[in-house]
Amino acid sequence: MDLWVAILLLIHVAGAIIGFGSVYTFGVLAPMAAKPGPAGVAILEAMAALERRLLRPFLFIQPISGVFLIFALHLNETFFSHTWLWVAIVIYAVTFTLGLTVQIPLMEKLPKLAAALNGPPTPEFLALVKRSQRVGPILTVLLSIIIILMVTKPGA
């Protein structure tokens, strides 16, 4: 394996582990964040920090390192014959868009709204939580499908 390819592969795989690995913790942390008071707010703030510091940077590093890998491995020459690759890229585009337009704004608002609560949750807060509970698992499943496609390369 060429050193350049090995470095790109390391960046791409490490990006997936570091950047998207944190997403899998949200399924564990979210129910704990439902606790009223400072503990729930702290968990929501931690989830927002994970997203801001780990997930967001890799949302952009992954496609860049992926494009470089495609060219370094000469997969661009027969791109559409690699169904696993272009399907994973399409799923990533959907996941990226959903994450950027829905989940990231939710994770920015939830800790702030939770911190401002002085009593029972407001309808706005509950609506955002419900929306996050719908979108979060979808993003996790889509990322899991991408990982499966990238690791197994079915049909390759």
Image (spheres, rainbow, N blue to C red):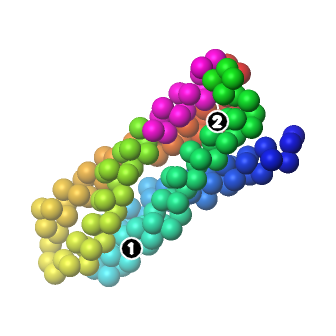
Residue 141 placed where, x, y %? Answer: 47, 40
Disc 1 element: helix
Identity of the residue drawn at 55% across and 37% down = 146
Give the total number of marks visible in the rendering: 2
Q: Residues within 10 Å of mark 2 (few under 14, many from 20)?
A: some
- For residue 109, which quarter of the picture? bottom left
Question: How much space separates mark 1 and mark 2, taking CA atoms?
Answer: 32 Å
Asked if the stretch drawn in magenta spans residue 83, the answer is yes
Amino acid type at mark 2: Met
| Numbered range of the magenta stretch | 80-93
Of pointers 1 and 2, the one earlier in the residue sequence: 1
Residue 63 placed where, x, y %? Answer: 56, 45
Q: In the figure, 81 relative to 123: above or below?
A: above
Identity of the residue drawn at 52% across and 60% down = 57
| Residue 131: mark | none
Disc 2 element: helix
Amino acid type at mark 1: Glu
Specify the principal SS of the magenta part: helix
Identity of the residue drawn at 75% across and 34% down = 73
Residue 1 placed where, x, y %? Answer: 87, 40
Q: Quadrant of the C terminus?
A: top right
- In this view, the residue in front, 1 or 110, is 1
Residue under label 2, please give it. 150
Left or right of residue 36, residue 2 in this image: right
- For residue 118, which quarter of the picture? bottom left
Residue under label 1, please give it. 45
Left or right of residue 118, residue 156 in this image: right
Q: Is residue 96 visible?
A: yes
Q: In the figure, 42 relative to 109: above or below?
A: below
